[in-house]
Amino acid sequence: MHGSEPLNQPLAGEMAPPADPARPAMVLLCASVFELIAASVLCSEYCEGTNAYAVSAGAVSTAVSLLVLVCLKYDDVVPPQIVELVPHVSGFLFMWWLPAWLTFTFVRPFAGLCNGFFACWAALVASIWLMRCHLPVVDGFVTRFVEVARSTLAEKAYVTALMVTSTFVWIEAAVLYSLPPYDGYLAWTIAVGVVSSVVCFAFLAVHDQVARHSRHIALALLTWWMQGLVISFVPTAFTGSVNGFVSVWLSLFLAAYFAFGSHSTAIADEPAISQYGPVGAASQPQPFMSPDLGVGGGFQGFGGGSTNLQPPPTEVGSGI
């Protein structure tokens, strides 16, 4: 398993999968142990519902992560039939932690700032990291996303991130709104997140049609989140949730970067550049060539072959 290479080669400067695939398994094992300890402390006082679920999630993940780590470290001793199951187990660990992360950090018992909160996030990230090492499909998806983020389509990556943080906002608000006492500010928080998510989704769905209006859409989203920032100042259960509170500020920063980032400036200038051709070496306007010039080497820049214009036909013996 150590010698396996991803199908997609990483870009220059990109965070490539580790040379030792056991590293994410070790991180996942440590995160699982921390989560299990935090859940066990809570379960010592009340061990039902989400508290019991948190204990089982940490226990299962600890056991499975330890087995994966043993298979990767001692793959020359472990039977090959078992080692070949590691990619499938990495997918299982991600599917195991995704609902657990959603439940523990958005609902309870780790919605606030605590060791369990960070352990759940670390476990989710480590499970994705482990999948990227063993599943070429996941590695290809991450590679393509990073490539888009560094290309002229960077706005798509930022808008996607804004859609994710906006979704975090309204999910956290909806969970808290479903619990008594029902706070009207939470309803407004849901609206702020849903509107932003819908606008981002629509922008990504019809990007080619609305690309010319990217700056206006970005400024509208920034304005929307500036008024939505009031949410973070109102003392509600939402401001006590780490996912919700941090997502509000991340959404504001992403909207600001979308509006004033370098990629937005390039988009705003695109109509003026596009009349000269694609962005790049040929994006500058070409000098006008008179038909009477451009034949012969007397004037640099208008000689034959320097442009795509063809010289006018000449008569035989004209001396040209």
Image (cartoon, rainbow, N blue to C red):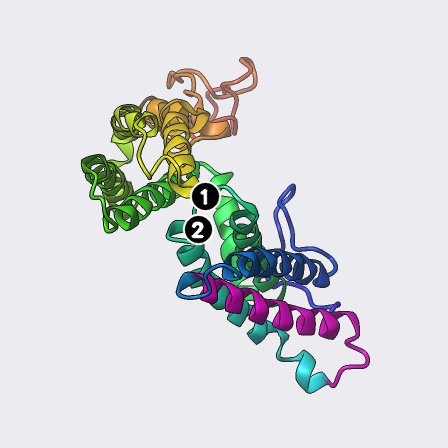
Kindly check if marks 2 and 1 are in contact, taking CB atoms under 8 A apart as contact. Answer: no
Q: Amino acid at mark 1?
A: Gly
At 41% from the left edge and 20% from the top edge, which residue is drawn? Answer: 285
Image quadrant containing the N terminus? bottom right
Q: Main secondary structure of the magenta part?
A: helix
Which element carries disc 1, helix, strand or loop?
Answer: loop
Which element carries disc 2, helix, strand or loop?
Answer: helix
Compare residues 86 and 65 and report the one nearer the observer.
65
Location of mark 2 (residue)? 105
Q: Is residue 137 above or below residue 225?
A: below
At 52% from the left edge and 26% from the top edge, which residue is drawn? Answer: 306
Q: Is residue 78 above or below residue 126?
A: below
At 49% from the left edge and 57% from the top edge, which residue is drawn? Answer: 141
Location of mark 1 (residue)? 112
Task: Determine crowd level at label 2: few under 14, some 14-19, many 20+ residues with C-alpha closer than 10 A.
Answer: many
Compare residues 216 and 94 and report the one nearer the observer.
94
Q: Position of residue 184 (x, y in %)?
A: 18, 37
Q: Quadrant of residue 230?
A: top left
Q: Which residues are magenta?
A: 51-79
Q: Amino acid at mark 2?
A: Thr
* Residue 43 within the magenta-colored segment of the rendering: no
Look at discs 2 and 1 and give the one toward the viewer: 1
Compare residues 150 and 160 and report the one nearer the observer.
160
Q: Position of residue 17 (x, y in %)?
A: 65, 55
Q: Quadrant of residue 25?
A: bottom right
